[in-house]
Image (tube, rainbow, N blue to C red):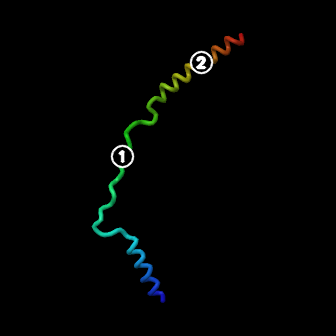
Amino acid sequence: MFASILVVFVSFASIAQSGTGVPPPPAPPPPPGLPIDGGIVALFIIALCYGVYKSYKISKQTA
């Protein structure tokens, strides 16, 4: 009985394997080489200037 069960499981395992001589599917193309943080320094400088401008404007209003 045990040997019969092993034969059935081996047959399932051999069916699940890919066929011989079949090449694997081609690999996907590589992602583009663009950096994620391209303009982060410029954005930081603009945000800093805007913050200084807003704080100056608010301090001038209250004074």
Task: State the residue at coordinates (38%, 75%).
Answer: 14
Q: Is residue 2 left or right of residue 34?
A: right
Residue 24, percent from left and from top: 32, 60
Secondary structure beneath disc 1?
loop
Between marks 2 and 1 in the image, the one whose residue lies nearer the viewer: 1
Residue 34, percent from left and from top: 39, 36
Above or below, 11 relative to 35: below
Q: Which residue is mark 1?
A: 30
Give the farthest residue toward the left: 21
Q: Is residue 53 left or right of residue 42?
A: right
Please tell me which of labels 2 and 1 falls first in the chain. 1
Which picture quadrant has residue 26?
bottom left
Label 2 – label 1 distance at C-alpha: 42 Å
Above or below, 31 relative to 61: below
Which quarter of the rendered picture does the C terminus lie within?
top right
Q: Nearer the viewer, residue 8 or 46?
A: 8
Residue 12, percent from left and from top: 42, 76
Above or below, 32 relative to 56: below
Above or below, 32 relative to 61: below
Q: Which mark is residue 52?
A: 2
Task: State the residue at coordinates (45%, 87%).
Answer: 4
Q: How busy is the neighbourhood of tag 2: few (under 14 within 10 Å), some, or many (20 plus)?
A: few
Secondary structure beneath disc 2?
helix
Instruction: Indicate the amino acid at tag 1.
Output: Pro
Q: Nearer the viewer, residue 15 or 30?
A: 15
Q: How busy is the neighbourhood of tag 1: few (under 14 within 10 Å), some, or many (20 plus)?
A: few
